[in-house]
Amino acid sequence: MKKVLFIVFAAIFAGLFCFGSAMALTTEDIAKASALEEIQKRGELRVGLEAGYQPFEMQDEKGNIVGFDVDIAYELGKAIFGEGGEKKVKIVNTAWEGIIPALMTHKFDIIMSGMTILQSRNLKINFCEPVYYIGQCLLINKKDVDKYKSYKDLNKKGVIITSKLGVTGAFTAEKMIPKATRRLFKDEATGAIQVANGLADAFIYDEPQVRVFAAMYKDKTVGIFDPITYEPLAWAIRKGDPDFLNFLNNFLRQIRGDGRWEQFKQKWFVDWIAELAAKQK
């Protein structure tokens, strides 16, 4: 009996020892497998985005990709590589419908593209802490300012709502304005132009982008900026990478605290939009 008990206890002890060793090894392996380690060894940070979401990311007159997220991506490069690290950031312009699959298949290391945190997306990827908060807003034709005061006025048959395919504007229109007809396009600009040309009653999209289109078509359109939704935007990475997630959250806290985040917000969400409006005839 004593011999049997000894064997049992010995087996339990050996199992616990092996389990503890496996746990320690797993933790070490996780750290080594972090995208952060891969980025440092590669000497390049690959950032996925879709260059059409003004003023987060877009192409300037020379074809360069610029914007709020782009400036912060360069700052992230400096945080990882040190002085001159912005030169080691590679921007990977990716169509929105393929941006999550591209991240998951290692086409780039991080999505920095004004992505709304959705639980359906969170099942596939991990988000860092929110970078920016927005809500869905409306762009309407100036001739309709007395007709449409809020999204509730649009919820009727015969009304045409535009937005972009696969974004929260389209989801919000379906949920909050179900009686209206929805026209969804591959790019947000087409949806806004439909309203400016009187071919649709309203364009629904993220508040910063609506402000951009209201500035671009200031003679024909006006924005209704009472937010319909509450949406935190965040950067996304592959699941199972606590080291990279920790680094990103601490980086975000740092740039918020030292004023860089506010400088970029002023540059793109205030000054750039004001310049855009001033250029319009």
Image (cartoon, helix red, strand yellow):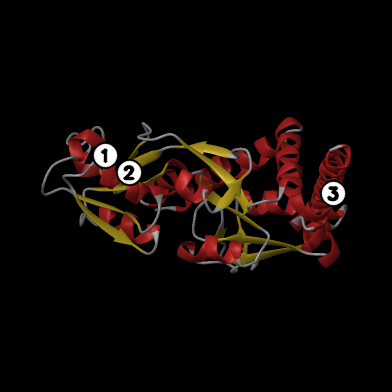
Numbered label attached to residue 73: none
Q: Position of residue 275 (x, y in %)?
A: 53, 47
Quadrant assignment for the N terminus: top right
Name the mark nearer the viewer: 3 or 2. Answer: 3
Q: Secondary structure at mark 2?
A: helix
Instruction: Give the residue pinned by disc 1.
Output: 176
Q: Residue at x 84, y 49 (%)?
A: 18
Q: Amino acid at mark 1?
A: Met
Q: Are marks 2 and 1 in contact (CB under 8 Å)?
A: yes
Q: Position of residue 270 (x, y in %)?
A: 55, 39
Mark pair 3, 2: CA separation: 52 Å
Crowd band around label 3 with a 10 angstrom C-alpha radius: few (<14), some (14–19), many (20+): few
Task: Give the residue type at disc 2.
Answer: Thr
Seen in the picture, residue 115 relative to 106 is either above or below; the reply is: above
Q: Residue furthest left?
A: 157
CA distance for labels 1 and 3: 55 Å
Question: Which mark sits nearer the N-terminus, 1 or 3?
Answer: 3
Q: From the viewer's perspective, tell me whether residue 48 is left or right of residue 76.
A: left
Q: Secondary structure at mark 1?
A: helix
Left or right placement of residue 251 versus residue 216 in this view = right
Q: Amino acid at mark 3?
A: Cys
Q: Is residue 89 left or right of residue 203?
A: right
Local secondary structure at mark 3: helix
Across and down, in percent, residue 195 comes to 26, 53
At 45% from the left and 48% from the top, the residue drawn is 120
Residue under numbered circle 3: 18
Other-residue count near label 1 (Cα within 10 Å), few / some / many at <14 / 14–19 / ≥20: some
> Nearest the camera: 188 or 231?
231
- The residue singled out by tag 2 in the image is 172
